[in-house]
Image: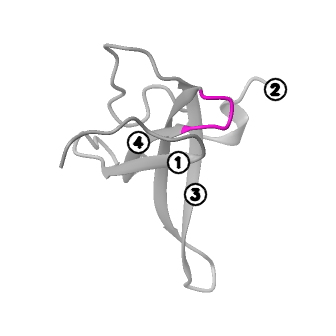
């Protein structure tokens, strides 16, 4: 399949092959928002207190040519790491 440019409001996620610890994302990818800017994002698979599986994700910095994050390189590890 040929690579096609991502359309606005779409994303791609791939299994994180560079996972170094349990805190690193299970999936990484990019998302293109309605404004046309593409951002990196991470997703973790978690389990609720009731035992229900769910996904939690973080959107990072805008995607730049030549840079690929290695898991959580561009993502905050917790809500307290976000500067606002």
- Secondary structure at numbered mark 3: strand
Mark 2 or mark 1: which is in front? 1
Q: Distance from label 2 to label 4 (Cα)?
A: 24 Å
Q: Position of residue 41 (x, y in %)?
A: 50, 39
For residue 36, above or below residue 22: above
**Which residue was labeled with disc 4?**
29
Instruction: Confirm or deny contact between disc 2 and disc 1 (CB under 8 A).
Output: no
Q: Distance from label 2 to label 3 (Cα)?
A: 19 Å
Answer with the quarter of the image where residue 60 lies.
top right
Mark 1 or mark 3: which is in front? 1
Near mark 1 (Cα within 10 A), the count class, few <14, some 14-19 or many ≥20, is: few
Which residue, as the protein is rendered here, is positioned at the far left?
Answer: 1
Q: Position of residue 79 (x, y in %)?
A: 70, 40
What number is the disc on residue 84? 2
**Which residue was labeled with disc 1?**
10
**Which residue was labeled with disc 3?**
56
- Secondary structure at numbered mark 4: strand
Magenta segment, which residues? 32-36
For residue 81, above or below residue 49: above
């Amino acid at each position: 399949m040929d690579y096609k440019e991502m359309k606005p409001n779409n994303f791609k996620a791939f299994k994180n092959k560079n996972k170094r610890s349990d805190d690193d994302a299970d999936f990484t990818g990019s998302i293109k928002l309605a404004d046309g800017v593409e951002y990196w994002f991470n997703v973790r698979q978690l389990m609720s207190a009731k035992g229900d599986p769910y996904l939690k994700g973080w959107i990072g910095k805008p995607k730049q040519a030549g840079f690929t994050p290695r898991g959580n390189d561009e993502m905050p590890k917790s809500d307290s790491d976000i500067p606002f």
